[in-house]
C-alpha cells in the first residue's frame, strides 16, 4: 500500500519533479517520500535520507535501467512500431518507482511539532547529490504543500 497522499497527482507536481530529475538527477520517489514525512511532521536528516536510499537502491537501479532502455528505444525503432514497447516500459518504470517509494516509506523521520516541507526536500535533494536552484525547490514545495 503506498504511503501518504497521492502527491504526484497534484497539479504541476509531475512536471516539476521530472524537471528536477532531468536537470540534476533527482530521485523522484525520494522527493515524494521526503514530502510525505514533512506532511506527517517528521523531520528528515541526512543520515536518515542516506540510509533509506541505500535500502531502496536495488529497486532504484532497476528504475534507472528500465528508464535507460525506454529512452533508447526511439533510436532503435521507428515511433509507430516501438510505441507499444515504450508504453510497457513506462508502465514498468512507474510500477518500480512505486515499489521504491513503498520501501522508502518504511523509514521514518524524527517526529517534531512542525516540519518545513522545504527543509525535507532540501535534505532529500542533497542526499541524491542534486543541487537545484532555490526557486525550483520553492516551486516544488509550494506545489506539494497543496495536498
Image (tube, helix red, strand yellow):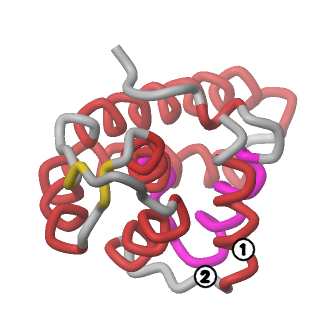
Secondary structure at numbered mark 1: helix
Residue 19 falls inside the magenta stretch: yes
Q: Residue at x 47, y 42 (%)?
A: 39
- Asked whether residue 60 is drawn in magenta, I would say no
Q: Horizontal and vertical percent for residue 48? A: 17, 62
Is residue 42 left or right of 52 when viewed as pictured? Answer: right
Count of numbered marks = 2
Tell me: 137 left or right of 111.
Answer: right
Q: Is residue 115 visible?
A: yes
Write the start and end of the magenta stretch as one range. Answer: 13-30
**Does 52 appear above or below 95?**
below
Q: Which labelled disc corresponds to residue 132?
A: 2
Question: In x, y percent, where is residue 35?
Answer: 48, 49
Which of the 4 image quadrants contains residue 18? bottom right
Q: Residue tagged by mark 1?
A: 136
Cβ–Cβ below 8 Å for labels 2 and 1? yes
Badge 2 crowding class, 10 Å Cα cut-off, few under 14, some 14 to 19, many 20 or more, is some
Quadrant position of the N terminus in the picture: top left
In the image, is 36 to the left or to the right of 132? left
Residue at (13% x, 50% y) in the render = 55
Tag 2 secondary structure: loop
Q: Nearer the viewer, residue 5 or 127?
A: 5
Residue at the outermost top position: 1
> Disc 2 to disc 1, how far (Cα)?
6 Å
Q: Quadrant of the C terminus?
A: top right
| Front residue (pair 84, 134) | 134
x then y, percent, for residue 64: 42, 53
Amino acid at each position: 500500500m503506498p504511503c501518504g497522499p497521492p502527491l504526484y497527482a497534484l497539479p504541476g507536481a509531475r512536471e516539476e519533479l521530472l524537471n528536477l530529475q532531468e536537470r540534476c538527477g533527482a530521485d523522484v520517489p525520494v522527493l515524494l517520500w521526503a514530502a510525505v514525512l514533512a506532511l506527517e511532521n517528521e523531520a528528515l536528516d541526512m543520515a536518515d535520507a542516506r540510509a533509506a536510499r541505500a535500502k531502496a537502491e536495488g529497486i532504484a537501479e532497476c528504475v534507472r535501467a528500465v528508464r535507460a532502455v525506454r529512452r533508447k528505444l526511439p533510436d532503435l525503432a521507428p515511433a509507430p512500431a516501438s510505441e507499444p514497447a515504450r508504453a510497457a516500459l513506462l508502465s514498468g518504470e512507474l510500477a518500480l518507482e512505486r515499489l521504491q517509494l513503498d520501501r522508502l516509506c518504511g523509514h521514518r523521520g524524527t517526529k517534531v511539532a512542525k516540519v518545513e516541507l522545504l527543509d525535507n526536500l532540501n535534505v532529500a535533494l542533497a542526499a541524491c547529490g542534486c543541487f537545484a536552484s532555490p526557486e525550483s525547490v520553492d516551486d516544488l514545495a509550494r506545489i506539494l504543500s497543496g495536498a
